[in-house]
Amino acid sequence: MYQQLIDWFVNVLRAPLAGLRGADPVLGLALVVLAALVLASALHRRLRLPRLLGYLLVGAIASPALLGLLQRTDIDPWKPLIDLAVAALVFELGTRLRPRWLVDNPWLAACSALEAAAAGGAVWLALVALGAPSPSAAAAAALAAATSPVITMATFLEARPRGQVAERLLMLSAINSALAILAVKLWPVLAHTKGLSGPDPLALLANASIVIFGSLLLGLACGVLIDRLGRLHDEPATMPVLQLALVILAALLAIAWGLSPFIALLVAGMTARSRMRHRLMVQPYLGSAGAALTVMLFVSFGVLSTLQDWRALWPWVLAIVLARLIGKGIAIFATARPSGLSWRQATALTLALQPMSSLSVLLVADSFGWRTQLPGAEPAVIQALLIATTLMQLSGPLWTLWPLRRIVDETGDDDDNPVER
């Protein structure tokens, strides 16, 4: 009886969406975005849950993984706007980082490298112990070490936390995401040594080096150009538009030249902040339009969710999630006292680092498919990673916000700082 009611409900929803998609593919997603806004507001008012969680849940419910009201191809017409939202968030993340902090606090620098390495190593050991091929387990482990920079940044814009844990969370998520991107670019070299792919490893290594250093140079050039043009531009009201235009240009050039948009935008943000200080006006870029882009971005994340083959792969999925938590926890607690953290703060930071996202890979990928970026990797291992990513991505705002609010009390009343501005 319950199954019949569920089928009836799905058919009732699917029929109008199919009609909308037939008229215009954009309309189907627009209706889901509207539903996401309503549900997110209701969850926030009644249960005090992050609005971002509501956006993700609605996208996941409408995705092929659950009700199938939307297909992944339905978000293709929105991709330019989604890329714009991603570029703005990553650039703003770069403006909030202080690289000098790593020099002033060497133990923080050690923590940033150790937590990524420990998480990756723990995931690799767990997968190999469960029978996964070692090279494929290494690829999954490198990607699993990353914390979602976009979930972290968007949660910050909603809750506006302030404190040691919040600042370290931004720094560590940026560093481990950059390391994940480096791993993707270097994977073909490892795959060649294991006989999993054919190209010359020296050529692959040279290409990876060009990508990394080219992205750094592009980011530096973009940051310097924002500063120089900002000095020539004397209209404060349109200054954010100028900055956004240069950010979009840097992202498009990175894609066109085969570089990493993530690294380029991150470096551009750090460079612009270093040179411009308070003259850099980042948030909000587009006012209410920026909030709409955030909603669309997280609904799209939900639509890209996958649970395919989870019954067969759940041991690997569970191993990835638990090993990642343990690995990051060991590294954070090992460096907590020398780097200036209390045990309570170390606990909060460990939990806040748990959100995963495909974004770290998608920003360096040529397409929205991980497997094309990891030639020779075992499909079952990558699928287990995708399922783990889905679970940690959908719950990501809770992982980020709850420890900051409940354990270390670094957030204020988020009603005063809503996303929908």
Image: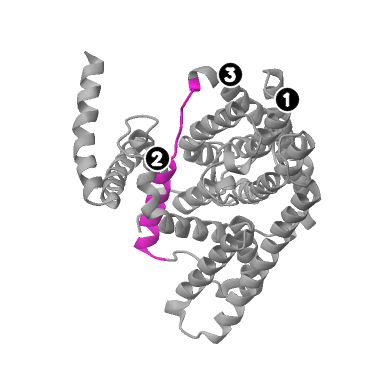
Q: Which of 161 and 306 is in front in this view?
A: 306
Considering depth in this image, is 31 or 338 the residue closer to the camera?
Answer: 31
Image position, residue 13 (x, y; %):
22, 35
> Real-space Cα distance between discs 2 and 1?
31 Å
Find residue 303 and name its label. 2
Where are the magenta residues, as a range?
286-310
Residue reaching furthest front?
Answer: 198
The amino acid at mark 3 is Pro
**Is residue 26 in sight in this rendering?**
yes
Image disc number at residue 225:
none
| Label 3 residue SS | helix
Is residue 82 left or right of 357 when viewed as pictured?
left
Q: Mark 1 points at which residue?
A: 125
Left or right: where 348 falls relative to 7: right
Viewer-nearest residue: 23 or 291: 23
- Give the mark, 2 or 1, whose residue is nearer the N terminus: 1
Query: CA gap, disc 3 to disc 2?
Result: 24 Å
**Position of the N terminus by quadrant:** top left
Q: Residues within 10 Å of mark 2 (few under 14, many from 20)?
A: many
- Identify which residue is drawn at 35% across, 61% down: 288
Residue displayed at 55% across by 86% down: 232
Look at the image and say whether residue 269 sits in the magenta stretch.
Answer: no
Q: Do the residues labelled 3 and 2 touch (CB within 8 Å)?
A: no
Give the mark nearer the N terminus: 3 vs 1. Answer: 1
**Residue at 21 percent of width and 30 percent of height:** 11
Vertical side of 197 occupied by 171: above or below: below
Element type at marker 2? helix
Q: In which quarter of the image is residue 386?
A: top right
- Amino acid carrying label 1: it is Leu
Residue bearing the label numbered 3: 315
